[in-house]
Amino acid sequence: MENMVLNFNYLRGEKIKVMAHPPYSPDLAPSDFWLFNYLKRGLDTYPDVTSTSSSYIVSLPFVTNTWNCINASSVNIPNNNTALYLKKNITNSASNMGNITVYLESNVDLTISNAQNILIFVQSGGIVQISNCQDMLVYLESTAKLTLSNGGNIIAYMKSNATFTADNIKNVTIYYENGATGSITHSTNETAILCPSITFSYPNTSSIHC
């Protein structure tokens, strides 16, 4: 990511116009179109990134209304869950998961080991550690932190002051605001796209009652 930032700064210094990255452009960035298989089955739920003159607006994919609410650190997380909602200020872990969607309120500390495909929303102050997953789509609010090791295809959206650390990943695509930090090692392909600003919209979490 640091090299990408240097390249952007150089282009701006040379007054070379940097074109906005259009969504759904396999001719320009094939790595953006793979995502993971269970989301590709319904492209109407694929996150739609539209660029304006000042911001990227990320419309999050629709998620089932059937959430398993975790409201205490002592609550055991069964490995057959498909949608987890973790309340703020708790610490928990999960392992041997299949396809799973996770929503973390602020200041949650979560560890996941061995999962197939993960869709995860991390609010401010959240800390997530994930090892051994196939594919992943992640949204990091400001000050959220994600550490990932041993994965397949990853797409991440990062607000300012979010942190992303990844090791031994096949393909990584990151959309990030100024102030976000990242470290990627041992990846086959990586793409980092600096956005003037990123706006997240959570269309179906307001009705959740945990």
Image: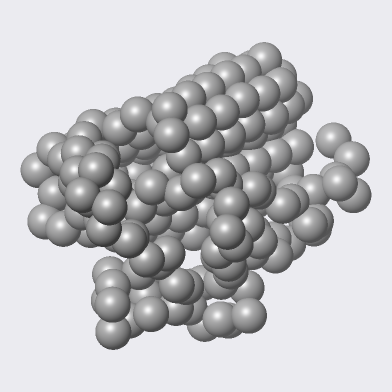
Residue at figure coordinates x 63%, y 80% from the top left: 44
**Residue 205 x, y percent position in the rendering:** 79, 48
Residue at figure coordinates x 63%, y 57% from the top left: 57
For residue 17, side relative to residue 157 (left or right)? left
For residue 84, side relative to residue 184 (left or right)? right
Residue at figure coordinates x 35%, y 29% from the top left: 181
**Residue 202 x, y percent position in the rendering:** 74, 51
Residue at figure coordinates x 9%, y 43% from the top left: 186
- Examine the image and state in which quarter residue 56 appears: bottom right
Q: How is the image coloured?
A: one colour
For residue 110, side relative to residue 148 (left or right)? right
Q: Is residue 37 visible?
A: no
- Examine the image and state in which quarter residue 113 appears: top left
State which quarter of the image contains the C terminus: top right
**Residue 39 x, y percent position in the rendering:** 51, 72
The one of 38 and 28 positioned closer to us in this rendering: 28
**Residue 164 x, y percent position in the rendering:** 36, 33
> In this picture, is 12 found above or below 204?
above
